[in-house]
Image: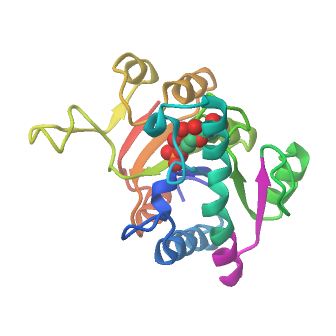
């Protein structure tokens, strides 16, 4: 296996389909893909976004802090069914929140997280960094560093970074590898620049891949999917 210890970031949208923000079939697909990784003896930590519930960039009005809190709490709508699906598949899982959310889940605790990973549990982080004005990309980078992941995998709607918008420009080419510096300079929207800066400072590679059945396991086995930021 190319990677033994990963952090996967799923955008909130990965959980939705057919007009539903959270679609049971999508949740099951994500859970079965994670199960495959666990079977392959990969230590898996996950950050689930909440952009399918609320996202500041889509709202851009009202009280920013309130909107951001809604976006962070929104992740629970994805995590609760994901935890259930994993348990039904007999995958050991432990969820941690970033701030008190009035749920059964404990708050982030470094030694408990490390212990859970050592016990080969899938660890899911919900509610972002716990602070407004950030994003789940930044939370994912932070958690990847805290869990000593070899790579941050952003599983998203597009299959990598392109030289131009591929939906508008047929000549747009996929960039297989790009430096932290150029992604920040180009202001590409594929990933939050705060997350990239944090990754750069700590030499954490970020892999952008399309979320679709089979891609995570292909990547773990060494297929050069998507784009890498390093
Ligand atoms: N958010 C926040 N702090 C965080 C993470 C997220 O305030 O640490 C809020 C912010 O409003 C953001 C929303 O939650 O717009 C949804 O997060 P994001 O857009 O990163 O979600 P994703 O694309 O991962 O589903």
Nearer the observer, 72 or 33? 72
Q: Residue at x 68, y 83 (%)?
A: 88
Q: Quadrant of the N terminus?
A: bottom right
Residue extending farthest to the right is 111
Q: Specify whether residue 30 is in view.
A: yes
The image position of residue 199, as x and y in percent, is 58, 28
Residue extending farthest to the front is 62
22 sits to left or right of 121: left
118 sits to left or right of 173: right
Above or below, comparing residue 19 to residue 4 in the picture: below
The image position of residue 154, as x and y in percent, is 49, 47
Q: Specify whether residue 153 is in view.
A: no
The image position of residue 181, as x and y in percent, is 43, 18
- Is 69 included in the stretch rendered in magenta? no
The image position of residue 51, as x and y in percent, is 52, 48
The quarter of the picture where residue 228 lies is top left
Q: Quadrant of ligand 1?
A: top right
Q: Residue at x 62, y 74 (%)?
A: 39
The quarter of the picture where residue 184 lies is top left
146 sits to left or right of 137: right
- Is 96 included in the stretch rendered in magenta? yes
Above or below, comparing residue 83 to residue 101 in the picture: below
Please report the bounds of the magenta region as a residue range. Answer: 83-97
């Amino acid at each position: 296996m190319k990677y033994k210890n990963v952090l996967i970031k799923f955008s909130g949208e990965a959980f939705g389909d057919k007009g539903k923000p959270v679609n049971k079939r999508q949740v099951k697909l994500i859970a079965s893909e994670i199960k495959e990784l666990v079977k392959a003896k990969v230590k898996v930590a996950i950050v689930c976004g909440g952009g399918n519930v609320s996202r500041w960039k889509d709202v851009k009005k009202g009280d920013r802090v309130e909107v951001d809190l809604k976006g962070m709490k929104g992740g629970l709508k994805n995590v609760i069914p994901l935890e259930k699906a994993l348990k039904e598949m007999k995958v050991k899982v432990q969820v941690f929140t970033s701030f008190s959310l009035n749920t059964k889940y404990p708050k982030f605790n470094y030694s408990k997280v490390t212990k859970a990973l050592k016990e080969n549990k899938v660890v899911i982080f919900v509610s972002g960094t716990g602070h407004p004005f950030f994003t789940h990309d930044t939370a994912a980078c932070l958690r990847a560093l805290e869990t000593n992941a070899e790579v941050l995998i952003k599983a998203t709607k597009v299959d990598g970074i392109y030289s131009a918008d591929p939906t508008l420009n047929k000549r747009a080419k996929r960039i297989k590898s790009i430096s932290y510096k150029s992604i920040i300079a180009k202001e590409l929207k594929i990933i939050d620049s705060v997350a990239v800066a944090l990754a750069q400072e700590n030499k954490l590679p970020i892999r952008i891949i399309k979320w679709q059945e089979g891609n995570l396991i292909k990547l773990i086995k060494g297929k050069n999917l998507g784009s890498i930021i390093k």
